[in-house]
Image (cartoon, coloured by chain):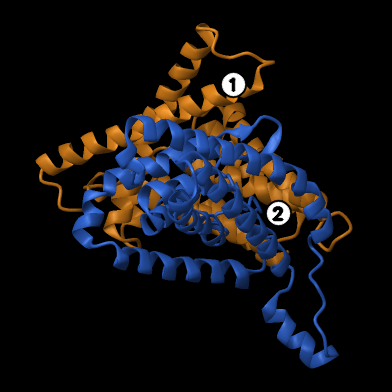
Chain colours: A blue, B orange
């Protein structure tokens, strides 16, 4: 849901390059945490979970410029590391059909990947202390999505400063001027209502999916 | 464009996206879009349907375009950047089979990732068809009512849950099939790549022209 739909060429090169570097590090850790034989065995599962996310991400919620991401569900079902890999695959596919810039795939993997990692951690904790897995899934999804939307807004806000130009500006005028490409207060005003509706819908969807799945194949979500 | 190699088309997209990144000049984007639409036309592709997909990028870029009113980057530039990049990528994927693109990625990305991407590509169509069939069945049987929101949500949860279970079982079947066929990592994709030929001149020309224009202006 917190997928950054920012087009190519709006965020300074430094930030999207940093996004790719961070993503490469996260993926390297993800692959090292998943034993090679285990990862090979889980290739179909990984691919199909990424496809399911892609289906969710390809359908906007009516007129709302938001969509389900199902990254929290990927984290719950696959675990945090395979979940992050699935997020990277779905982001790359989305970029290949022009859905979000190809240069921001790295940043998107960091932001949406946080949903898989945090979603897994919160769900694992909540299901031990809450009356049902449905409630645990909804609570984990709500908190995770609030964090990831905040992260997405932070990325857009931070990217208004170009560090490569900032060094020069500090030397010459003693301060840093914003790029002023995007008004962050206006950006937050536009997306806040959509984000609230999106968080409610996605959290309910994840809760209902988890409830349905636990009734039929409880082992899928570690029950 | 269908006859050009994946390499030349990926290079074209890389050059156009580089131009999109560095340029803030409207004529550069208009020239790029003209070239891309002509390439779609001569490739005998349904231009309007492809542009509808690009409209998706346009809708989402509007949030950033509206947020940029009064800023250093005009909203029109933001929209043009989004649409130009989207159309170039759409030209690539509508004229190049995905496995050929993955064949190129294979040189830089881990093998397991490429295999998972191939499975994603194949499964996407299976899952989307299965969910759309399920949606039709639900509507036909009166499972959807515009006024009963709680019931609709519950139904939607069941549909998505069913889709999830189906996807999970699909992955188990695929895993067994791959194991039986001796899968040890590395699905063969590079062997079907199209060789470099004279047809590569067009995408290279488009990419180079747009990039040079962006640099010169």
Q: Quadrant of the C terminus of chain A?
A: top left
Question: Can residue A54 be seen at all in this image of the molecule?
Answer: yes
Q: Quick one: A204 or B103, which is closer to the camera?
A: A204
- What label does residue A136 carry, if any? none
Q: Is residue B114 left or right of residue B67?
A: left
Front label number (2 vs 1) = 1
The span from disc 2 to disc 1 (Cα, nearest Å) is 48 Å
Q: How many marks?
A: 2
Residue at 76% from the left image edge and 53% from the top image edge: B77
Label 1 neighbour load within 10 Å: few <14, some 14-19, many 20+? some
- Mark 2 highlights which residue? B28
Which chain letter goes with mark 2?
B
Secondary structure category for the residue under label 2:
helix
Q: Is residue B214 left or right of residue A207?
A: right
Residue at 32% from the left image edge and 34% from the top image edge: A217
Q: Is residue A88 left or right of residue A10?
A: left
Please say if B59 is above or below B47. below
- What label does residue B152 carry, if any? 1
Please say if A22 is above or below A134. below
Q: Quadrant of residue B52?
A: top right
Which residue of the protein is positioned furthest toward the bottom in this rendering?
Answer: A171
Label 2 neighbour load within 10 Å: few <14, some 14-19, many 20+? many
Q: Quick one: A84 or B107, which is closer to the camera?
A: A84
Q: Quadrant of residue A148?
A: bottom right
Q: Is residue B111 left or right of residue B183?
A: right
**Percent of width and height locating residue A77:** 38, 46
**Percent of width and height locating residue A183:** 82, 60
């Amino acid at each position: 849901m917190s997928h950054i739909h920012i087009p190519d060429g709006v965020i300074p090169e430094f930030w999207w390059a940093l996004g790719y570097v961070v993503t490469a590090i996260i993926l390297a850790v993800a692959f090292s945490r998943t034993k090679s034989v285990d990862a090979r065995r889980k290739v179909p599962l990984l691919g199909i979970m990424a496809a399911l996310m892609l289906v969710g991400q390809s359908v906007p919620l009516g007129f709302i410029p938001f969509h389900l991401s199902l990254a929290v569900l990927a984290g719950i079902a696959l675990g945090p590391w395979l979940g992050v890999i699935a997020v990277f695959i779905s982001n790359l596919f989305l970029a290949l059909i022009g859905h979000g810039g190809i240069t921001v795939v790295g940043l998107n993997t960091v932001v949406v990947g946080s949903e898989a990692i945090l979603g897994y951690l919160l769900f694992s904790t909540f299901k031990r202390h809450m009356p049902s897995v449905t409630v645990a899934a909804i609570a984990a999804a709500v908190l995770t999505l609030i964090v990831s939307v905040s992260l997405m807004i932070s990325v857009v806000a931070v990217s208004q400063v170009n560090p490569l130009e900032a060094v020069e500006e500090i030397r010459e005028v003693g301060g840093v001027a914003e790029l002023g490409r995007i008004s962050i207060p206006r950006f937050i005003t536009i997306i806040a209502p959509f984000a609230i509706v999106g968080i409610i819908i996605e959290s309910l969807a994840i809760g209902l999916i988890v409830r349905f799945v636990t009734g039929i194949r409880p082992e899928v979500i570690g029950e | 464009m269908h006859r050009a190699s994946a390499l030349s088309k990926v290079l074209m997209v890389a050059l156009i996206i580089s131009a999109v990144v560095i340029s803030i000049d409207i004529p550069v984007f208009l020239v790029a879009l003209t070239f891309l639409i002509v390439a779609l036309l001569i490739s005998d592709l349904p231009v309007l349907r492809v542009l509808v997909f690009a409209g998706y990028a346009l809708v989402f870029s509007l949030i950033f375009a509206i947020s940029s009113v009064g800023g250093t980057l005009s909203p029109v530039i933001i929209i043009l950047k989004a649409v130009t990049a989207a159309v170039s990528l759409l030209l690539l994927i509508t004229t190049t089979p995905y496995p050929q693109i993955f064949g190129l990625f294979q040189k830089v990305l881990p093998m397991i990732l490429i295999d998972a991407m191939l499975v994603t590509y194949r499964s996407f169509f299976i899952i989307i068809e299965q969910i759309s069939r399920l949606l039709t069945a639900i509507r036909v049987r009166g499972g959807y009512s515009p006024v009963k929101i709680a019931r609709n949500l519950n139904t939607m949860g069941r549909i998505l849950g069913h889709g999830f279970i189906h996807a999970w079982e699909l992955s188990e079947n695929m895993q067994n099939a791959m194991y039986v066929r001796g899968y040890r990592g590395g699905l063969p994709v590079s062997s079907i790549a199209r060789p470099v030929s004279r047809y590569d001149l067009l995408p290279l020309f488009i990419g180079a022209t747009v990039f040079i224009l962006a640099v010169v202006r």
